[in-house]
Amino acid sequence: EIVLTQSPGTLSLSPGERATLSCRPSHNVINKYLNWYQHKPGQAPRLLISGASSRATGIPDRFSGGESETGFTLTISRLEPEDFAVYYCGQSVFSPTTFGQGTKVEIK
Amino acid sequence: EVQLLESGGGLEQPGGSLRLSCVASGFSFTSYALTWVRQAPGRGLEWVSTIHTGGDTLYADSIQGRFTISRDNSQSTLYLQMNSLRSEDTAVYYCARGTSDTYYRFDYWGQGTLVTVSS
């Protein structure tokens, strides 16, 4: 099983600031098969990024995905009020599908 | 517009059964794999089960042998039959569409249905 470790657990920021979230896979075999999802309480999760860096349909360009030395990153260039939520990375290239434990982006 | 609408959740006693449904619309149901993902209170997302277009199924170890995923292509409906329920099955259950044209991803999700297992 591919374990995805997200950091930090919580990010306290103000609107307009930049958010950088990390996701590190336990095995360096998933290549670019890494997705990012946004989840707000009481709502359906929403796909943000697939293939590590491709924005899903309708996702604003302030959201970007990339790779780092240790794994993958999700960057929100300037936080809008609606961006405060929990973010999950996920992979389905290896069974079972796994998700990270989530990073909560909260208003400072 | 792609829509996924779950139903069937509720309060059930340990050892009991529930059947969840997910009605899909706005896309060619037979062309997509479908998945159940759950979120227990205070926890993150957990993959539960997937059914592919040809009927092949996958299950998480935690529910193997207790839950059965199925699909009715004529009704564009996904099901999850949940037997021998345990308290740890308490969660919001989401259905999600899987798309694999480029990188496999869950591109649409339903709003979820709450399952509570308690005596």
Image: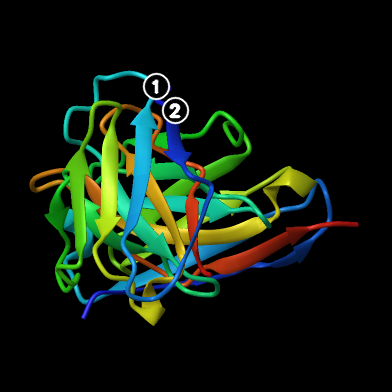
Q: Is residue B99 above or below residue A12?
A: above
List x then y, in percent, for residue B114.
63, 67
List x then y, in percent, for residue A2.
39, 25
Image quadrant holding the N terminus of chain B, namely: bottom left
Provide the chain ID for the residue under circle 2.
Answer: A
User: For this rendering, which residue is in front, B59 or B107?
Assistant: B107
Q: Circle 1 — which element?
A: loop
A86 to the left or right of B106: right
Q: Is residue A6 above or below residue B82?
A: above
Disc 2 designates what residue?
A3
Provide the chain ID for the residue under circle 1.
Answer: A
Q: Residue furthest left?
A: B102
Q: Amino acid at mark 2?
A: Val
A54 to the left or right of A37: left
Q: Is residue B92 above or below residue A32?
A: below
Mark 2, Cα crowd under 10 Å, few <14 / some 14-19 / many 20+, is some
How far is mark 1 from mark 2, CA to CA?
5 Å
Disc 1 designates what residue?
A26
- Residue at horizontal 45%, vertical 41%? A7
User: For this rendering, which residue is in front, A81 or A93?
Assistant: A81
Q: Are marks 1 and 2 in contact (CB under 8 Å)?
A: yes
Residue B78 in view: no
Q: Is residue A8 above or below residue A58?
A: above
